[in-house]
């Protein structure tokens, strides 16, 4: 072999070897780096992907004594809305924590984007495989905030146009800090924005449903799964539906004024629960006051104008004096922070009073007449409750949109009808709806296209479940 050719051969061989060494080093470095500052994409426990148990194999998912929650998710959203969201993981004795979260529409497509407001502790990554966006902790964000718990706050920016219901999926880690993943516990959580009241099958639409006091039976026409019935309650009970187990399905529930007991069936596992909370004369006002995605057992006591509630987040008992004996209770999320606000409508002066949970600020607005029925809900889909009333004398709905302060009047219904607003078409906006007790007919105007629909479901004497918290 000529000398120059051999020299060229050795040079090429050296370049190949050096390139191979560099490639192996670079690949190993990138993988190590990725895992040191946060998990790779695809471990948020969303449909079709894994979770942190892929590496932390010591215990099954959600088998530990701790918990994980997604806080601050409002009932609805508007295009490009910036929503602060907090993820919290609790596990006694854990020395480090981690998480990953993604947001998807009902088709499994990425929904919105994330902004890492704390760039020291959190980061945003995008999957090159399916384009899903994730927010997760960095290495600097694994230290507990206080013994046994850690939380991270970031911003979710809604899509530029509405995409229907959006689901948030998250997986989190409570680690023992010994460098061996076998001793770590993994938790999961989910939350939805654009959900609907009286949604028993988790399809994002309000279901036609009634409670029949004469036989203590719930009759439900699920928009996705069809008809079902539950014998649950008695003639003296008050229907008190809510999502008490946080699975995004409405649970069958009643409040028994004679004993102050709450009875409900968890839709997640069919478990029966009984909780003594309240007294005769109290009004059930179950709602999510702590923003953890679960309904809190709560009552309003007209005799002293006080709200009493049990926080599902930590089991703590709380009470707030707000209102008087003449007031009608209208708890809703008026400020769009994902927490229900204490609120009342006072017929004597047609005024709404509410406490914003974001800053505890007191607010009031005059809207309606003393004889009107309050039907507050989110009719414009901006994630905030709109002041609204139904005037039975004329069958007219009056609505004040919170998004632009526009006033809307819609004649729909008659004297004797029971207003039953709900998201019947699944577009994330409340639809005007009524239940006519005399013949068991439902009449609804879809907000998505203005279409009218009518259906017979129920009988005279039935209580419409979507109207359970209409005072």
Image: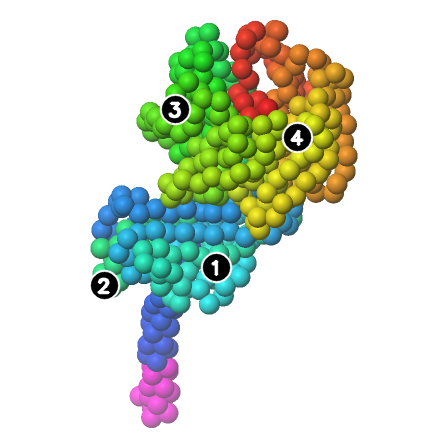
Q: Gap between marks 4 and 3, in whole Å?
A: 28 Å
Quick one: 334 or 356, which is closer to the camera?
356
Residue 178 is tagged as 2
Q: Which residue is mark 4?
A: 346
The answer to whether mark 4 and mark 2 are in CB contact below 8 A is no
Left or right of 334 on screen, residue 53: left
Q: Is residue 305 visible?
A: yes
Magenta residues (range)? 1-16
Question: Does dot 1 land on a helix, a strand or a loop?
Answer: strand
Which circle's residue, 4 or 2, is located before the other in the chain? 2
Q: Is residue 294 above or below residue 57?
A: above
Residue 261 is tagged as 3
Which circle's residue, 3 or 2, is located before the other in the chain? 2
Tally of numbered discs? 4
Residue beneath the point at 37% across and 31% down? 268
Quarter of the rendering occupied by the N terminus: bottom left
Binning the other alpha carbons within 10 Å of mark 4 as few (below 14), some (14 to 19) or many (20 upward) gives many
Q: Gap between marks 1 and 3, in whole Å?
A: 47 Å
Quadrant of the rendered structure where residue 190 is?
top left
Q: Which residue is mark 1?
A: 125
Q: Gap between marks 1 and 4, in whole Å?
A: 49 Å
Q: Position of residue 26 (x, y in %)?
A: 37, 73
Tell me which secondary structure the magenta stretch mostly adopts: helix
Question: Does dot 2 land on a helix, a strand or a loop?
Answer: loop
């Amino acid at each position: 072999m000529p000398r120059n050719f051999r020299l060229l051969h050795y040079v090429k061989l050296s370049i190949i070897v050096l390139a191979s060494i560099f490639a192996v080093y670079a690949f190993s470095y990138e993988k190590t780096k990725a895992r040191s500052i946060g998990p790779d994409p695809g471990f948020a426990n969303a449909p079709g992907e894994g979770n942190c148990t892929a590496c932390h194999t010591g215990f099954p998912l959600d088998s530990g004594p701790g918990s994980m929650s997604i806080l601050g998710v409002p009932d609805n959203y508007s295009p490009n809305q910036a929503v602060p969201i907090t993820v919290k993981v609790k596990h006694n004795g854990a020395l480090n924590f981690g998480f990953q979260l993604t947001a998807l529409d009902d088709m499994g497509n990425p929904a919105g984007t994330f902004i890492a407001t704390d760039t020291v502790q959190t980061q945003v990554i995008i999957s090159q495989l399916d384009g899903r966006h994730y927010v997760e902790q960095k290495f600097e964000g694994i230290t507990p905030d206080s013994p046994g718990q850690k939380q991270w706050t970031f911003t979710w920016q809604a899509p530029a146009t509405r995409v229907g219901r959006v689901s948030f999926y998250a997986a989190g880690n409570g680690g023992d800090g010994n460098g061996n993943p076998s001793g770590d516990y993994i938790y999961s959580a989910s939350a939805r924005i654009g959900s609907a009241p009286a949604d028993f099958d988790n399809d994002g639409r309000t279901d036609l449903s009634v409670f029949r006091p004469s036989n203590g039976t719930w009759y439900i026409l699920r928009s996705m799964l069809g008809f079902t019935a539950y014998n649950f309650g008695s003639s003296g009970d008050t229907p008190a539906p809510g999502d008490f187990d946080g699975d995004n399905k409405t649970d069958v529930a009643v409040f028994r004024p004679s004993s102050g007991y709450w009875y409900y069936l968890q839709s997640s596992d069919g478990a029966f629960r009984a909780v003594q909370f309240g007294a005769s004369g109290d009004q059930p006002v179950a709602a999510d006051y702590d923003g953890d995605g679960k309904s809190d057992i709560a009552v309003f006591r007209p005799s002293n104008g006080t709200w009493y509630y049990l926080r599902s987040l930590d089991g703590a008992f709380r009470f707030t004096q707000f209102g008087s004996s003449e007031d009608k209770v209208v708890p809703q999320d008026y400020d769009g922070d994902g927490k229900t606000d204490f609120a009342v409508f006072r017929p004597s002066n047609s005024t709404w009073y509410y406490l914003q949970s974001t800053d505890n600020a007191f607010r009031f607005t005059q809207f309606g007449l003393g004889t009107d029925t309050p039907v507050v809900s989110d009719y414009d889909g901006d994630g905030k409750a709109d002041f609204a009333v139904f005037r039975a004398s004329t069958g007219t709905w009056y609505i004040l949109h919170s998004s632009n302060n526009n006033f809307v009047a819609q004649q729909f219904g008659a004297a004797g009808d029971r207003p039953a607003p709900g998201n019947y078409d699944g577009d994330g906006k409340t639809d005007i709806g009524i239940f006519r007790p005399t013949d068991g007919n439902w009449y609804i105007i879809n907000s998505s296209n203005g279409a009218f629909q009518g259906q017979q479901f129920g009988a005279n004497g039935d209580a419409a479940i979507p109207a359970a918290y209409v005072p």
